[in-house]
Amino acid sequence: MSSIKKVAIFGAAGNFGTPITAALIKAGFEVTIITRVESTSTFPPDIPVIRTEYTVEKLTTALSGQDAAISAVGPGGISTQVAIVDAAKAAGVKRFIVDDFGWGPNFRSLPEFRPIGAQRRLAWNRAKELAEASPQFTWTGVTIGNPIDWAMNRFPLMGFDARNHNAIVYDDGTEEFTGTTLEGIGQAVVGILKHPDETKNRFVKARSIQTCQKHLLHAFQQATGKTWNVRRSSSKDLLESGRKKHQEGIGGWVLELVIFQLYDPGEARCIVASKEDSDVELLEMTEETPESVVKKVLSSITS
């Protein structure tokens, strides 16, 4: 049985922090939200909230008595990660879940993303350094791949505009990738805390589904009972457009290059792991289908 009971979370109101917080509560953990003094985010009324300055000293006090801490902050909070890691260690936190929830440390990303990755690695490396010096402190990273239901709902450029029944199919639509649903992200975190020994000091590989555009489009059309308007495009166009914007300092390049990586033909770049090589069984995650993922997307649109 896990010794982790009390859990603090940073970024609890964010895109991934919200489902993680809900999953922790459902699993019976004692959750505390830590946020900046000036934060205007709203939180569930029945969860304790500590508002603090993000200095090591203040964060150490805020984290006192916690068994685990989870960082799910957005891009704007990445620069605070080393301070949060140092504070967690100083406060006696047993497990720190670092802020990844992406493609993990071994992803073959385009060179344009290296500065972003380098900033994230500062906290990963600091957590690893502290764990090596003090075995009482441990860490875990969560590699989720594409946050599939959230991404399809938010970014029509990924190929699916469910509100208007429009699709963009890149190349032949068969390049496979792995994705993790918001529900799956929450369960992955719960699974880590329930199995601390098996998940310590490494990145776990989470996935809800392995699929492709062709299968998702079929599921969308079946679920909506409509024939969608389909436009054909090339992932190469995304690469060229994204790189041009990056060179010219124009916004939008990140999304275009992320989607290129997802659908880059024949590369299998965005498969985190096969089901057999993943940690889904250890983390007690549910295997999804295109139909179940599409149902989640459509439900989020109508709710």
Image: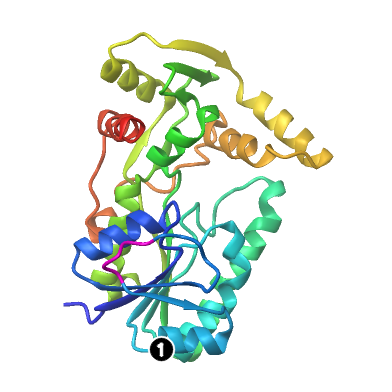
Residue 116 position within the rendered picture, expressed as x and y whole percent measured from the top left: 66, 56
The question of residue 44 being in magenta is answered with: yes
* Residue hosting label 1: 135
Residue 203 versus residue 71: which sits nearer the camera? 71
Residue 231 versus residue 56: which sits nearer the camera? 56
Residue 43 versus residue 22: which sits nearer the camera? 43
Q: How many residues crowd mark 1 within 10 Å: few (<14), some (14–19), many (20+)?
A: few
Residue 185 position within the rendered picture, expressed as x and y whole percent measured from the top left: 35, 53
Q: Residue at x 52, y 78 (%)?
A: 84
> Which stretch appears magenta?
43-47
* 92 w.r.t. 167: above or below: below
Q: Quadrant of residue 70?
A: bottom left
Residue 122 position within the rendered picture, expressed as x and y whole percent measured from the top left: 62, 71
Main secondary-structure element of the magenta-colored stretch: loop
Q: Is label 1 in a helix, a strand or a loop?
A: loop
* 110 w.r.t. 284: above or below: above
